[in-house]
Image (cartoon, helix red, strand yellow):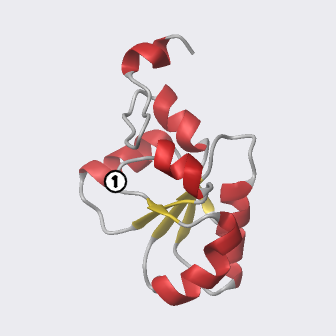
Amino acid sequence: MARLMSSTELHQRIEKGEDFVLIDVLGNDDFSQEHIPGALNMPLSELRQRAKKDLSKNQRIVVYGKDHDEESSNEAATMLEELGFRKVADFDGGLMAWKKAGFLTEGEQPETLGEMAEL
């Protein structure tokens, strides 16, 4: 079972420049609108095929979805482990937890800190 990662831990790993692949498993449109900086988009529906082609089983991989209630990141982590990837973490809380922690996003319509305060 993939270990869970908090927004603080993920942010620290990004800031330190640690070597891992961050995968957003939401749809292409959602990713275009907003995502965590540096993330790759591999929608859950495409993950199995793309992981075999684009990822190494020796890479550290962190997957995330929309929020804590949505199951796509958990499904993605399980799928990757079933494919033989052993260094997989599930970013618990996904994009919503990232924004609530005050970290910025990128894309066509990232939320500003002012908009986040209204949440």
Q: Is residue 67 visible?
A: yes
Image coordinates of residue 9 in percent, x first then y, are 42, 46
Foreground residue, 25 or 19? 25
Rendered image quadrant of residue 43: bottom right
Instruction: Give above or below for 2 relative to 110.
Output: below
Q: Residue at x 44, y 85 (%)?
A: 58
Instruction: Give above or below for 72 relative to 47.
Output: above
Foreground residue, 62 or 47? 47
Q: Is residue 1 visible?
A: no
Instruction: Give above or below for 4 relative to 114.
Output: below
Q: Residue at x 62, y 50 (%)?
A: 65
Image coordinates of residue 21 in percent, x first then y, are 41, 68
82 on left or right of 8: right
In terms of secondary structure, where does tag 1 sit? Answer: helix
Q: How many marks?
A: 1
65 on left or right of 109: right
Q: Residue at x 52, y 74 (%)?
A: 87
Foreground residue, 32 or 64? 32
Q: Residue furthest top?
A: 118
Q: Which residue is mark 1?
A: 13
Rendered image quadrant of residue 20: bottom left
Of the residues shown, which amino acid type is indicated by label 1? Arg
How dense is the environment of label 1, judged by Cα within 10 Å: few (below 14), some, or many (20 and up)?
few
Q: Quadrant of the C terminus?
A: top right
Instruction: Give above or below for 67 relative to 54.
Output: above
Image coordinates of residue 33 in percent, x first then y, are 49, 42
Q: Quadrant of the N terminus?
A: bottom right
